[in-house]
Image: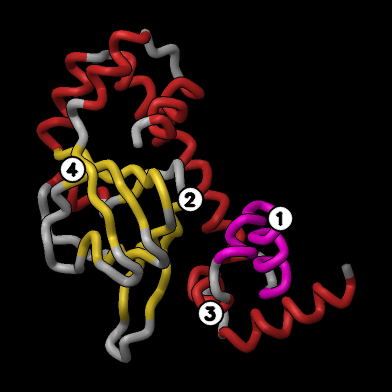
Amino acid sequence: MFDLLLSHIQNKVDLPEEQSNQIQTFFTYKKLRKKQYLLQEGEICKCLSFVSKGLLKSYTSDEKGNEHINMFAFEGWWTSDFNSFINQEKAVLNIDAVEETEVLMITLDDYERLMLEIPVMDRYFRILYQNSLVTKDYRLMVSNSFTAEEKYMQFALRNPEIIKKVPHNLIASYLGLAPETVSRIRKKWSLNT
């Protein structure tokens, strides 16, 4: 259950063997059914979660009940409503399982303690946050500058696993496009490949 997390950490920082076992003590395991919430808007986000199996989506809902997907979290990805987690304020995001999912969760107190007791984890999380900022900047640029087809093509090229695994209506929500637009682009794209 911890193999993927430890591998993910080792890919970013040099983690001594003895600290691998210690890290596991900071986390709790949770299994989610398809469509089960990990977090609902208005709750306090109590944990930062690492996806060890499955797929989550984080999103907001508008007054009509339409979902606006903020991100997908696949195996090996972290997710939370980070503002809610760090500041212990009410969450603005919902996070639920697109499919049966398993997560490893760490509370804010344990997160802080982890970085104090195993200093290399501070560097690990800094690397993650830097990568996240780069990704969010790129997503904002694509959202503001690209046509619908360019948005889909860039997304598909950067995330081929998502294209194969996620229903097109969820991809449309993530890209800020109508499902019909994504269907049309997918059809056109499949004819050209």
Residue type beneath disc 1: Leu
What type of secondary structure mainly makes up the magenta span? helix
Q: Is residue 111 inside the magenta stretch?
A: no
Disc 2/disc 1 C-alpha distance (Å) = 17 Å
Side of 48 relative to 108 (left or right): right
Disc nearer the start of the sequence (3/2): 2
Residue 42, position in %: x, y?
13, 67
Local crowd size for mark 3, using a 10 Å CA cut-off: few (<14), some (14–19), many (≥20)? some
Disc nearer the start of the sequence (1/3): 1
Which region of the structure is painted magenta?
A: 148-165
Residue type beneath disc 3: Asn
Q: Residue at x 72, y 85 (%)?
A: 184
Residue 105, quarter of the rendered image:
top left
Disc 4/disc 2 C-alpha distance (Å) = 19 Å
Camera-side mark, 3 or 2: 3
Residue 49, position in %: x, y?
28, 45
Disc nearer the start of the sequence (4/2): 4
Q: Is residue 116 above or below residue 32?
A: above
Label 3 element class: helix
Disc 3/disc 2 C-alpha distance (Å) = 21 Å
Along the line of sight, the residue nearer the viewer: 95 or 125: 95
Camera-side mark, 3 or 4: 3
What residue is disc 1 on? 157
Q: Is residue 153 inside the magenta stretch?
A: yes
Disc nearer the start of the sequence (3/4): 4
Q: Residue at x 44, y 17 (%)?
A: 13
What residue is disc 3 on? 169
Disc nearer the start of the sequence (4/1): 4
Contact flag, marks 4 and 1 (Cβ < 8 Å):
no
Residue 192, quarter of the rendered image:
bottom right
